[in-house]
Image (spheres, rainbow, N blue to C red):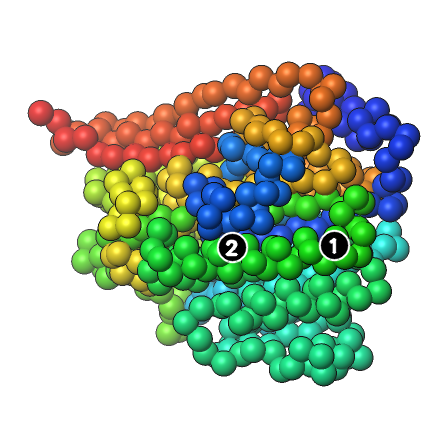
Amino acid sequence: MTNVARLLFLAAWLLPAIAFGESEPAAEERHIVVVVWDGMRPDFIDEHNTPALWKLAQEGVTFSHHHSVYITATNVNGAALATGVYPNRNSLLANREYRPSIDPLRPFENAEPEIIEKADNVTGGKYIAAPTIAEIVRKAGRRTAVVGTKAVAFLHDRHAEWSSGAVKDLVKFAAAPMPEPLRQETLRLLGPFPLEPSKTDEPRNAYAARALTEIMWRDGVPAFSLLWLAEPDQIQHDTSPGSEASLAAIRVSDHNLARVLDTLAKKDARKNTDIFVVSDHGFSTIERAIDFPAELRKAGFDATKAFKETPKRGQIMVVGNGGSILFYVIDHDREVAARLVEWLQHSDFAGVIFTRDKFDGTFSLETVRANSPEAPDVMVALRWNSKPNRFGTPGQIVTDNARGPGEGSHATLSEFDVHNTLVAAGPDFRENLTSSLPSSNVDIAPTVLRILGLTPPQEFDGRVLVEAMDEKAGRIEPLSKTIQATRKFPSGEWQQHLRLSLVGETVYIDEGNGSFATSP
């Protein structure tokens, strides 16, 4: 970090005395509420489908150039939101990973509670390798509440006392801190956790919102609260974005936001509370689905999605994450990795290729802050385009074969996956402002802790969103940059690019894609 950047960072933390004035409540009286709408695209915010969010945006700040962290998936962004640092520093690179120290034969979903417990044992408590907002706030002696309808909620406070319920081994309700007496009170007042199979997560989301507002806020609003709503993600996966079912799910999430806002108003807490409504990622429609292990085997690779016995050097573990694929080459066999890269570069589905070792026509894993010790040898963001789906919603992608064409997915570097939702309103934010300055999920943690007056225990990768909080912050000019990587073959040329925005030393990925151009 340069001396100028350090001064700007320190100034951002000293700004409260200048920005808020003596008449505002002290930092220790502040409340922060973060509501996550999983998979919410910003282009679906309007007065009809999201009246509560629409009104909140008029009262506060809409971040029109907000970014998901790559891989643009739930757990990656859950960790980024919680810690304010990128995957190489918090350790979560994808929703599904392969780490032999945790399971030598197969990949795992990395937010499930049993995986978190085992991984913490393996890493000495450093599975999430950076402290989270909730953990920092609780360490400071202030109350927190974390409620969600997905396992990603567990990433936000691994040391709290949790209450949870699951359907078919998938967590569908989680709340912390929720000791046994509070759990019993929840069951008495709200009934049993709604764990029966259903086509939507509407019952569970409503239950979670009630658990937060009626149980966990009963004795006052904590310093920090997080409510993670599973919709519209689930329905968009099943039907694709823009379907009537997905719009209905968005309206349900808006209803739950209205419940949160009404409760704050009844407790006379709006004047002291900043509300963030954010999504973990955007969404796209699947144009084409590929069975990658099968295609690799056809090309002569020894590839699989699960080993039956101890793997041998040069075998490839293929871990699908929707629009991005992770390839783990056993013993980091460079010759096999090189052949794999060349195969991808000649394909009609690769978008942007990232590699552990240096290969022509690729970017390093460090480019997307994925260069952790557990990282794969090759990672590819699959190809995308702007074509509309059958509901007129733009953005189609190639994915693995976990879902089929016409359904929805994400996790690519498509502009429709990368650009997600952020609205913030409350006493510390300007009113009726649309900010076009680039921002990201990794900026939430530093901004929240600045408002709460808590000193961060580590330097963040994200920045404080001062432009949305103080008219005197001055005009900040972002920079734009495109980086490219190419490789020539006798039959043509592989070309890939990343389009970036920069605010100071913070880098945001706007989109990336690639293609193989055949020689004339």
Q: Residue at the spot x=45%, y=64% of the render?
A: 107
Q: Residue at the spot x=61%, y=70% of the render?
A: 207
Disc 1 versus disc 2: distance between alpha carbons? 22 Å
Quarter of the rendering occupied by the C terminus: top left
Question: Is 445 placed left or right of 434 in the picture?
Answer: right
Q: Which mark is residue 264?
A: 1
Name the residue type under label 1.
Answer: Leu
Q: Residue at the spot x=60%, y=78% of the render?
A: 193
Q: Which mark is residue 430?
A: none
**Image location (x, y in percent) of residue 50:** 51, 49
Question: Is 473 placed left or right of 103 in the picture?
Answer: right
Name the residue type under label 2.
Answer: Asp
Name the one closer to the observer, 233 or 261. Answer: 261
Secondary structure under the numbered disc 1 in the rendered image: helix
Residue 180 vertical placement versus 518 (above, below): below
Question: Is 157 placed left or right of 385 in the picture?
Answer: right
Q: Residue at the spot x=56%, y=78% of the render?
A: 194
**Image location (x, y in percent) of residue 466:** 70, 28
Q: Which mark is residue 38?
A: 2
Query: Mark 1 or 2 closer to N-term?
Result: 2
**Image location (x, y in percent) of residue 427:** 76, 38
Residue 229 vertical placement versus 437 (above, below): below
